[in-house]
Amino acid sequence: MNQETPWLQVPAAPIDEDARRRAEERQTRLTKPLGSLGQLETLATRLAGMQGSDTPRADTVHISIFAGDHGVAAEGISRFPQSVTMEMVRNFVRGGAGISVLARSIDARLEVINLGTVEETGPLEGVTDVRIGPGTANFVQGPAMDLHQLALAMNAGRHAAERARLAGTEVYLAGEMGIGNTTAAAAVACALMGAEPEELVGPGTGLDDAGVRHKAEVLRRALDLHRGHMDEPVECLRRVGGFEIAAMSGAYLACAQMGMPVLVDGFISSVSALATARICPSARDWFLFAHTSAEPGHRRVLEALSARPLLDLGMRLGEASGAATAVPLLRLACDIHGRMATFDEAQVAEAL
């Protein structure tokens, strides 16, 4: 915590337990055996409590994509060059990326935020430019960020969440783009959970077995360097995180403080959510989890969050793609909750 981020100490908004209980009571009266729609029922009742409404909604969805490069890419932990980060930023705003297509399909607003890429392009139409620097520093050699850079990244996330709130967003999604970011996410997760690198590293952009072993060795060197200095979650983010990982954590915390539901994406997004929950435990109440990704470490992170994700499709793209894929399930849950007839309305006998 520092003077640039006093808001990190603000607690999360309370869940409306009365609205949640009313939703649970309504579920007992709908024309179905209680529990027969599984997580669709839980989704509706949780959203009712989050939104303080008897008619929860997931129609207005906002997606923030945070982009930033990573100094640890110099260690050869990705199959792709850093130039891909900026190339994908352009692809996002031109409509050709996976999340661009998904956002159109679910009628969601998509905002792309450049926090700091190696390539400098100047203003780019459709991109919110919040350049902190040309990527983070190589955390194998020292901290990824200084305190000021960390504050800028987390504040950028908070401001993105505030823009979403002002636009009437009912459910918030965040995604990321940055060559090297699965390595940074694994490093943050290891630091937060006390896990070994081999437990959490995965192929990322498509590494083979030798590449994954090298990635774990790079992580071990970094964790050894910073050992004893990562007792606080914000220090984990600063020392071995990334601009976009810190920004998502800031966005998630701001959502919880403002009372805006969050649908968390995959491995990297879940690491940001874990950091947020360690900063502010009550923020966890505002998180729904979209899917289990194919990144090996994701299940461990989900367990640490006591999360029950909605989907398991073998996805590992990032970009909030898994969260966007799960949005129709939220909408179906709300539709069933609000429009399905009760036993009385349908004149159907209830269970004995």
Image (spheres, rainbow, N blue to C red):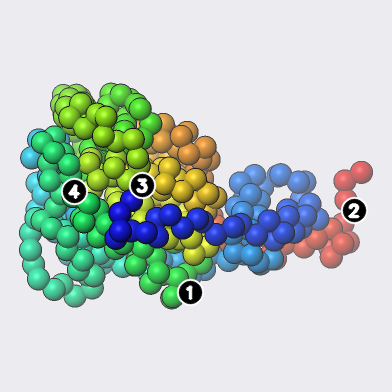
Q: Give the number of the mark in front: 4 or 2.
A: 4
Q: CA distance from mark 3 to mark 4?
A: 16 Å
Q: Earlier in the sequence, mark 2 or mark 3?
A: 3
Above or below, 55 against 133 in this view is below
Residue at 46% x, 34% y: name it: 304
Discs 4, 2 touching: Cβ within 8 Å: no
Tell which residue pokes out farthest to the right in this image: 352
Q: Residue at label 4?
A: 145
Above or below, 258 against 138 in this view is below
Tell which residue pokes out farthest to the front in this image: 3
Q: Earlier in the sequence, mark 3 or mark 4?
A: 4
SS at circle 3 = helix
Q: Give the number of the mark in front: 3 or 4.
A: 4
Left/right of residue 316 with respect to residue 68 in the rendered view:
right
Q: CA distance from mark 1 to mark 2?
A: 40 Å
Total number of numbered discs in the rendering = 4
Identity of the amino acid at label 2? Ala
Q: Give the number of the mark in front: 2 or 3.
A: 3
Q: Earlier in the sequence, mark 1 or mark 4?
A: 4
Q: Residue at label 2?
A: 349
Q: Residue at label 1?
A: 168
